[in-house]
Image (cartoon, rainbow, N blue to C red):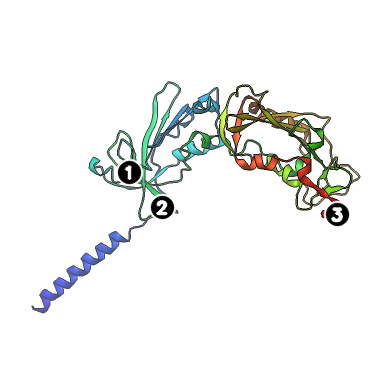
Amino acid sequence: MNLKKLFLILSSLIIIVGLFITLLSKEYSADNEYAKFFTDIESKIDSVKKIEIETTENAVYLFNKNGKWEIPGYENYPASEEKVKKFLISVVQLKGVDKKTKNPALHEKLGLAFPLKQESIRIRLLDDEKNLISDFIIGNTSSHNEQFSYIREFDSEQTWLFKNEFDFKTTDIDWTEDSILKIARWRIKSVKIEGSNKKSENIYIYKDKYSDQSFKLDNIPNGFVLDSNFNLSNFASMLESIKKLDIKSSILNDKDNALRQIYFETFDGLIIKIKSFKSGDDIYYHFDVDSDIKVRKELDENEPNIVGLPKMMTFEEIEEEKTKYNYLKNWYFKLYKDFNTGTNFTLQDLIVEKNSN
């Protein structure tokens, strides 16, 4: 083999290897700027009145009624406005990265076939007249970069790779607020738990002043003290995060199945009444939020400023908070077990004899 022929062969091999390496090393950076996938949806997004999210497991439907998003799967319970807004913004800002195949035979491999395959999601946005605004399928995640997934519009064979910034909620309960209430522990003035007809078993904890750092336990019998292993602040922190498993608009014979009543009062004038009921094998809770200026107890002007103590909300803000939570009284909630175990106490569970503490 002469040198000229050998040189041509080596040059060809180098070019082929270079092209092969280039193809294999093709990557997509999440920091790059890419074109928006839907070029005209931004002008239509405010017209969306119905959202449909379909998977192989189930389908979620959201409706906008009189400016409020509702979940028909939970008897029109309010959807989280924040979650819906974030979702619609993600649709508007969806960005295509790379144009892929338009061969329908390859759709299934990318998770873009219909009927849907496992982990695929179909999303439909409609207006008030049920006119289709957008209809697309999101398929598999890219094997090269988990920040990117495959997508195609439902009536198009063309597929794309896109930057996936969706926080998908594929069950009805996930579209509700994350916590039924969000009341900070430092706001709590008192907590009363009534679990039976015996007043001697009821629990009442309180703070005298807004600036107090710890709670006191009332009605401790002579010869007993608070168990040092028990932290009364645990009761006050329970309203910071209350997560639910199920929602109902009514429970049969709730008066006959009442288990426990819990009353929270805040220094700024909010009152939270919680009642638990037995429903079959489950426990459901009812929440009623009210306000009362007479309950309000502001920081005494003569008290020293406490570093880190948040400023008390005005009573006007409390009235707004009451209105915000007003819808809760129309519903019953099955909660995570931690709420039931965290309130399932009697006074006797919190105290010990003086000589045994």
Instruction: Give the left or right position of residue 344, taking residue 73 as reference.
Output: right
Percent x, y of residue 124: 40, 32
The residue identified by callout 3 is 355
Q: Residue at x 18, y 71 (%)?
A: 11
The residue identified by callout 1 is 111
Percent x, y of residue 150: 35, 45
Percent x, y of residue 118: 36, 42
Mark 1 surroundings within 10 Å by alpha-carbon count, few (fewer than 14), some (14 through 19), many (20 or more)? many
Quadrant position of the C terminus in the picture: bottom right
Which three-letter amino acid code belongs to the residue tagged 3?
Asn
Instruction: Give the left or right position of residue 336, taking residue 152 as reference.
Output: right
- Which is nearer the N-term, disc 1 or disc 2? 1
Percent x, y of residue 59: 42, 32
3 and 2 marks in contact (CB < 8 Å): no
Q: Nearer the viewer, mark 3 or mark 2?
A: 3
Quarter of the image holding residue 349? Answer: top right
Residue 241 bears which disc, if any? none
The residue identified by callout 2 is 146
**Please, what secondary structure does the residue beneath circle 2 have?**
loop
- Which is nearer the N-term, disc 1 or disc 3? 1
**Please, what secondary structure does the residue beneath circle 1 have?**
loop
Looking at the picture, does residue 150 appear above or below residue 14? above
Q: Residue at x 32, y 61 (%)?
A: 25
1 and 3 marks in contact (CB < 8 Å): no
Q: Is residue 310 visible?
A: no
- Which is nearer the N-term, disc 3 or disc 2? 2
Given the current orientation, which residue lies at the most extreme right position? 302
Q: What whole-number distance in Å separates the C-alpha atoms at marks 1 and 2? A: 15 Å
Q: Residue at x 83, y 47 (%)?
A: 212
Q: Is residue 28 visible?
A: yes
